[in-house]
Image: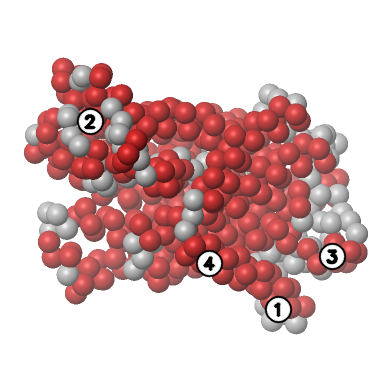
Amino acid sequence: MGEEGMPSDVKNTAKTSPKLTVLPLVALIFYDVSGGPFGVEDSVRAGGGPLLSLLGFLIFPLIWSVPEALVTAELATSFPENGGYVIWISSAFGHFWGFQEGFWKWFSGVMDNALYPVLFLDYLKHSLPIFDQLIYRIPALLCITVGLTYLNYRGLHIVGFSAVSLAVFSLCPFAVMGILSIPRIRPKRWVAVDFRKVEWRGYFNSMFWNLNYWDKASTLAGEVENPSKTFPKALFGAVFLVVSSYLIPLLAGTGALKNSSSEWTDGFFAEVGMLIGGAWLKWWIQAASAMSNLGLFEAEMSGDAFQLLGMSEMGMLPAIFASRSKYGTPTVSILCSATGVIFLSWMSFQEILEFLNFLYAIGMLLEFAAFIKLRLKKPELHRPYKVPLGTFGATMLCLPPAALLVLVMCLASLRTFLISGAVIVLGFILYPTLIYAKDRKWTKFDTEQPAVPSGTVMPGNSDIAQLHQETADEASVMLLSDLSTTRTDQEDYEILVEGKVE
């Protein structure tokens, strides 16, 4: 596979690299989705007051976060391999659409990740103004990106436990703020709202962005210890952690202080800390904000890199993207993602918020459709964790979040439609280009099935999703692998897997 040409000791080390357990996976999911309440302040301003913001973070998790987490838990444990949603879409709709899904998610993830080193310096420049000057700012951005990329290179277990430490540090000041605010809270302030000031586009985009990316951790499924048990626990633990990290600071800040909704913009929690606890709490919150951006970067890059690795193992990308370091990490995929971060770091968060949401919404509609399609197409699919609903109930579960996705897309600007359309067209062009490159043997593609992670045993009689289309008419959407060696059903897949596991 992608490890060909590597020394045997490197291969063995990579294969025995430590796996993610529940706590590090909770932290990584937390940073994939949230990272703390930084950025939720704008929901108060866009909502014309605290009421819509508080209701949003109570209701949106029920109609969006919980359904997405349930779907992710079922599909990630059914396909415990790196690549995540790329494999789900390929199994349900063919590998052309699997490739498109992977391209959209990777592209938006890298763009999103480019913001975190910038935001880190934006918090830091309040104490060190030199980072507002380009002569110092550019080298600092490069150093931060290189340093965080090296942490990813050293292994997911390091990234995971780093995320745990960062999460504790980032959330502690808000727990303290919540306690200090109790004597000053006036519940009537929570129900304040001025509908004349409500900005529905900004409100829905803020809610959506702060509560999405639950599926991102699925791209690391092959690196998780006992995924059938670890994934559901970690997802549901992360849902509770994310919702609490939003509601507690909002309840404290809006209940204890009487500020105009227009003052609630990005970074306002530092001022809230100043008013409630004093200068020491303000500086603690600013430091936590900076550290949270580092955690967000680590989680995002891990997901992006292992997604490329999974696509390479499926034959969608050249085999070099599946090559691993002695730490078990996908070296070339990490470097590719880091390069994208460096080139895109000039963009601001406000410029790409709608763009990220739009591409993400398209991908999620495809994921919900794949979830239903696999329930219909493969009822006997081995599902270590299964959403406790029949096919009709599962369809009903997906309708509210699908309606929200359509709403977010309808609220997008013309510029967002144009940029997203350009990315989609690029993906349509890239897929046949890679097929042509493989046919011409310009680069090596992997033609083997990816192995199931160590310790994962798939039942021999389960009929897991087809990884290739069965008719010549659908050949145009096949994986980039030799047709003579393709497997047409999961029984062949399991034989290969069992041979490797044994």
Asked if labels 4 and 1 touch by Cβ distance under 8 angstroms, the answer is no
Quarter of the image where the C terminus is located: top right
Q: From the viewer's perspective, is the residue at label 2 or at label 4 nearer? A: 4
**Residue that numbered label 3 is attached to:** 475
Q: Which mark is residue 253?
A: 2
In the image, farthest residue toward the front: 196
Amino acid identity at mark 3 = Ala
Amino acid identity at mark 2 = Gly
Q: Which mark is residue 437?
A: 1
Nearest to N terminus: mark 1 or mark 3: 1
Quarter of the image where the N terminus is located: bottom right
Q: From the viewer's perspective, is the residue at label 3 or at label 4 nearer? A: 4
**Residue that numbered label 4 is attached to:** 418
- As rendered, which of 82 and 20 lies closer to the eye? 82
> Image point 57% across, 59% down: which residue?
104
Nearest to N terminus: mark 3 or mark 4: 4
